[in-house]
Amino acid sequence: MVIGFFKKLFNVRDRNEQAKFTGITTAEKRQQTKPQTPVPAIEVTEHQAVESQLDLSALFYSLLFATPSTTTTGIANNLERSVMQNIEQALSSPQSIAENVLKLPSKILELDKKLGDDNIETQELILLIEQDPLLCVEVLKLCNSPAFKRADTDVSSIQQALVQVGRQQLRQFITACLARELIDIKPIYFRRFGAEIWRHSMQVAFLASELASNEQRDSAFLLGLLHDVGKIAIFKMLVDAFYQAEPGEQPNSILFKQVMTTKSLTLSALLARSWQLSQHFETPLTLLANTNIKPTDGMTLLIWKANIISECSMLLQVDKLPQPALAVLLAQVECSEEDFIELHQKLIQF
């Protein structure tokens, strides 16, 4: 049963299994699906919910930073104070950050719109993608990655990719490759951050996409990719401040992690507005910024759940998430431990 849930979530078919048209919609199939074993009831108070999410975010930042120092203090050092001042300025003037610090690739929305146009013929679509050779290379690498490879032989062309993964999945791959331009962390010290935040964004994007209804999948995917752009902007500010920092200064105070937790989501929403994204993106990001409330809006709830599952998985992989904390978090997202383990095995392939 769990394996079936896992395959359904990630649209995985056995290689010998052929897709069959039954005339039944996805929504109808979900209604006909036999209910899974209920998640064991764990009473989680509102206070526990808030604390567990803040603790999870703080642990996740520790994973991203990977500072050599094991000492965590409650007092911000000069490096952290400088960055926190820059964060406050960014919140009051997000347009400046959107134009100078974290500029959304101009092609991402333009190409995504064309890829979503069903009136464009397949050959025209292929030619459109092949105009950017570097993009083609990145898309093919993603198609052949362990998380998404669907055949024994590698995909070697965009046309072959279209046949093997389908138009909608290819559209998501292209969006992901273009969005990765946002994560350009050059100093060696921060390369781990770039790799881990990209991995996390991909996990959230695909989890949200597969959990969404068919009509919302593409929006959920892009929203999953962009939900943490506030973190990326703050880390780029940190890179600039790092050059002027005193030797040995590291971003590891509790205060700084709390500021990062609460401010990065707000900055994500402000950046979405500055980039003039539609309300479909800005509204969920604004709602996500309220860390004290579990979202009720459908799209926001998808991203919220996907984010928690991804952070839990990444922390569990490096043995940084205590079992009691994991149990509380899984109860909040209504995911059994058994289902989470299956998801975790998939997510570690990213």
Image: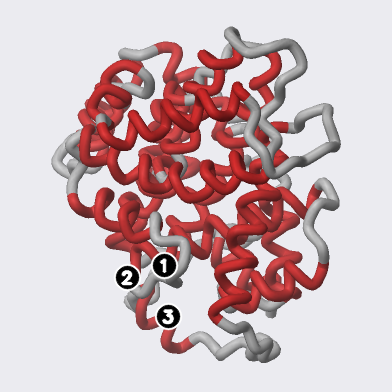
On residue 29, the disc is 3
Seen from the viewer's position, the closer of residues 75 and 69 is 75
Give the numbered dot on residue 297. Answer: 2
Report the front residue among 257 and 255.
255
The answer to whether residue 57 is above or below residue 37 is above
Residue reaching furthest to the left: 119
Tag on residue 301?
Answer: 1
Q: Can residue 15 be seen in the rendering of this structure?
A: no
- Callout 3, which amino acid? Lys
Residue 215 occupies quadrant: bottom left
**What is the three-letter code of the residue carrying label 2?**
Asp
Whole-Å distance between the Cαs marked 3 and 1?
Answer: 22 Å
What residue do we see at 31% from left, 45% from top? 269
In this picture, is 7 found above or below 335? above
Left or right: 255, with 321 as reference point: left
The residue lying furthest to the top in this view is: 243
Q: Secondary structure at mark 2?
A: loop
Q: Residue at x 61, y 60 (%)?
A: 309
Q: Look at the image and tell me in which quarter the N terminus lies.
A: bottom right
Determine whether the residue tagged by mark 1 lies in a helix, strand or loop: helix
For discs 3 and 1, the disc positioned in front in the rendered view: 1
Tell me whether circle 2 and circle 1 mark residues in contact (CB < 8 Å): yes
Task: Look at discs 2 and 3 and give the one toward the viewer.
Answer: 2
Query: Residue 18: image x %, image y %?
Result: 54, 61
Query: Measured along the vertical axis of the image, is residue 27 above or below residue 320?
Result: below
